[in-house]
Image (spheres, helix red, strand yellow):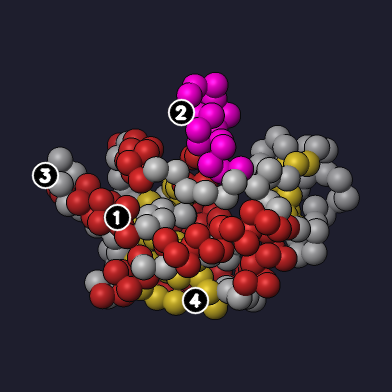
Amino acid sequence: MPEEMKRNIVLMGAPGSGKGTQGAILSEKLGIKAFSMGDILRNVATGETKEAKKVKALIDKGNMVPDKLAIRLMEQELFKPENQKGFILDGFPRELSQAKALDKALNSRKYAKLHMDIDLVLLLQVPDDYVIERIIGRYQCAKCKSLYHEKYKHPQVFGICDECGGKEFTRRADDTYETVVSRLRTFRRVTAPVIPYYEMKGLLVCVDGTGPIDVVSEKIRKIVGY
């Protein structure tokens, strides 16, 4: 990876803005792992512990998990040796306190020598009606979790996953109109204050996320430099 290439990247944007899709593309192109806080939380929510049930209840209602839990779960993934050559964060930090806690962890005595400071923050901008349409229409392969959409992305062969050949598809329990509206409100109230925090650090770049996936990806490619 060229030295000037951005390698530690935060993807920001409202729910359904395309963070997951663009994060996966960046992960493949750069050869580094994309961390989705949503996926991490959903994996935790499948458990039977008291904590897992609490996380599941919060997710189903479109609410955010406690700050300390989110930070702890992310740090467990981020500082694994195999992930120290670079990372992509999707959906984290979700609030200003998390952004500050992340910076504190990355610059702590334990990890400072790894040079894992944030290089770039990409803000994908899309209008609310676009977000709602995207989320309500999406579904995924039950086997490999590949994402599809009723309008924008069908399997090449009807009813068969392009990636693994699976024939069963599911929708996330929280992909409903009511939950999406709740999540958009939460984004504006809780996550939006993170934007000026990174802007003041000179890390923020805004990207129009309303175009086709490949068009948005090309915009990001020019910014990242791969």
- The relative height of residue 33 versus residue 20 in the rendered view (above or below) is above
Kindly identify the amino acid type of the residue bearing the numbered disc 4. Val
| 3 or 1: mark nearer the eye | 1
Q: Residue furthest left?
A: 109
Identify the mark nearer the N-term, 1 or 2.
2
Determine the CA span between mark 1 and mark 2: 21 Å
Q: Nearer the viewer, mark 3 or mark 2?
A: 2
Q: Secondary structure at mark 1?
A: helix
Nearest the camera: 44 or 218? 44
The numbered mark, 4 or 1, whose residue comes first in the sequence reads: 1
Residue 141: x, y in percent?
73, 42
The disc, 2 or 4, on the residue closer to the chain's N-terminal end is: 2
Q: Is residue 103 visible?
A: yes
Q: Is residue 53 magenta?
A: yes
Tags 3 and 1 in contact by the CB under 8 Å rule?
A: no
Magenta range is 45-60
Tell me which label, 4 or 3, sits earlier in the chain: 3
Q: Which residue is mark 2?
A: 51
SS under mark 2: helix
Instruction: Name the residue at 32% across, 73% down.
Output: 196
Which image quadrant: the N terminus? bottom left
Q: What residue is pinned by disc 4?
A: 207
What residue is shown at x 47% (from left), y 67% (from top)?
188
Task: Identify the amino acid type marked 3.
Answer: Arg
Tell me where residue 13 appears, x and y as whole percent. 50, 66
Residue tagged 3 = 109
